[in-house]
Image (cartoon, grey):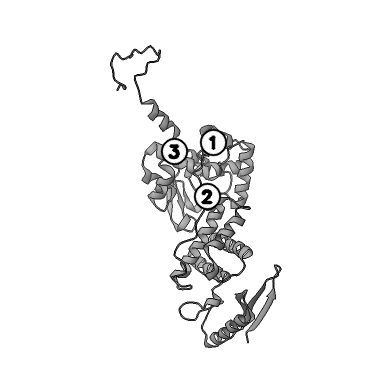
């Protein structure tokens, strides 16, 4: 027989849940914060549905939309987790649940119907004291996506809201994310040779941080000179292949370790990020330089050398050419300088009023 439990949390809030057994295992259905009468109503409905075999995992499915009292923020988190388990990478699913943990910590296990724009704005104001606007925008996108998924599956009503929760407008960055030749030389001067090989791999392939860490020797064809990025590794499950240039090929052919397993087995995503941040600070790199700058540098060089945005998009594994254009269609500073220097006006350098060209035009071709 299921058991209705009332618990006091460390933050003094009272929450309810139901303990029951399914397939010989103890399960928990979270009701969340509510009054005693509502909790008992949900409990009796739960027991009836359990007896009829109408349970789906830990969530009661009353055929169609979930009852209003059951549509809580923790329930939305579970709904998002079940979708992510099938459609997303484990790391992505974990990141999304971490966001919901923060939402629950600041908002409490409120009904989804109480997720108003005002409440989300209050959440944003608190989080901005702890994280950057870019990080907060990721959290808002995850919340918006989870709600859209819940609407599409009719877990919540289709008229739940008319507009998505607003993200923070971030001014276009003035920092230079693509590396100069001098910066590349300085960053590759590290004495940690494995770290150096990792940076060179990023620079020569344009791989994302996590993609490079998951590349194995089975993904590398030295005879044909190609690196394969598997669908399980690439973003959004996209597969692609990247030709190996001569510089990287020479390094791979002289690789000091056995050619089995991962190329970089000793690095983890967060570890390599922190390692690079420390090294970039030691190298006195400007703010905005990150591991992603190697990918940007790769893309910009391909764009400037080939002039074909489709090639850049293909090599970088972007979801569309529009994404590539957004980040790589801007002219480089050298291209801008050449454009400006191509302009020639009839300028009286001596200031004596005499046109040096002997004409009355304002521009010479």
Q: Residues within 10 Å of mark 3 (few under 14, many from 20)?
A: some
Task: Say if mark 2 contacts mark 1, CB within 8 Å.
Answer: no
174 relative to 2, above or below: above
Q: Mark 1 highlights which residue?
A: 184
- Numbered badge on residue 253: none
Q: Residues within 10 Å of mark 1 (few under 14, many from 20)?
A: some
Q: Residue at x 62, y 67 (%)?
A: 108
Q: Quadrant of residue 71?
A: bottom right
At which x and y percent is residue 3?
65, 83
Q: Earlier in the sequence, mark 2 or mark 1?
A: 1
Q: Residue at x 62, y 74 (%)?
A: 33
At which x and y percent is residue 107?
61, 65
Q: Residue at x 50, y 55 (%)?
A: 167
- Numbered badge on residue 212: 2
Q: Mark 3 highlights which residue?
A: 301
37 relative to 171, above or below: below
């Amino acid at each position: 027989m299921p058991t209705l439990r009332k618990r006091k949390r460390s933050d003094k809030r009272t929450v309810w849940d139901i303990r029951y057994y399914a397939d010989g295992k103890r399960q928990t259905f979270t009701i969340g914060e509510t009054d005693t009468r509502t909790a008992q109503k949900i409990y009796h409905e739960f027991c009836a549905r359990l007896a009829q075999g109408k349970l789906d995992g830990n969530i009661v499915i009353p055929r169609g939309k979930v009852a209003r009292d059951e549509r809580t923020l923790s329930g939305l988190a579970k709904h998002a987790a079940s979708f992510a388990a099938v459609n997303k990478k484990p790391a992505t699913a974990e990141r999304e649940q971490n966001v919901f943990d923060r939402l629950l910590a600041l908002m409490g296990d409120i009904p989804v119907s109480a997720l108003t724009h005002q409440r989300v704005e209050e959440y944003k104001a608190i989080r901005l004291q702890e994280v950057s606007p870019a990080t907060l925008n990721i959290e808002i996108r995850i919340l918006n996506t989870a709600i859209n998924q819940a609407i599409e599956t009719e877990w919540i009503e289709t008229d739940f809201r008319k507009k998505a929760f607003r993200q923070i407008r971030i001014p276009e960055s003035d920092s230079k994310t693509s590396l100069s030749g001098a910066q590349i030389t300085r960053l590759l001067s590290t004495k940690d040779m494995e770290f150096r090989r990792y940076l060179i791999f990023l620079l020569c392939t344009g791989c994302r941080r996590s993609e490079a860490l998951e590349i194995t020797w089975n993904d590398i064809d030295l005879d044909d000179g190609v690196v394969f990025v598997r669908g399980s590794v690439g973003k959004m499950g996209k597969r692609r292949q990247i030709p190996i240039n001569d510089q990287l090929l020479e390094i791979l052919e002289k690789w000091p370790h056995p050619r089995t397993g991962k190329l970089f087995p000793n690095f983890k995503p967060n570890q390599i990020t922190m390692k690079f941040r420390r090294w970039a600070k030691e190298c006195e790199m400007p703010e905005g330089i990150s591991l992603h700058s190697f990918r940007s540098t790769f893309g910009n060089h391909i764009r400037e050398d080939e002039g074909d945005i489709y090639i850049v998009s293909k090599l970088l594994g972007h979801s569309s050419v529009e994404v590539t254009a957004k980040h790589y269609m801007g002219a480089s500073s050298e291209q801008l300088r050449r454009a400006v220097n191509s302009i020639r006006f009839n300028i009286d350098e001596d200031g004596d009023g005499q046109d040096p060209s002997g004409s009355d035009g304002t521009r010479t071709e």
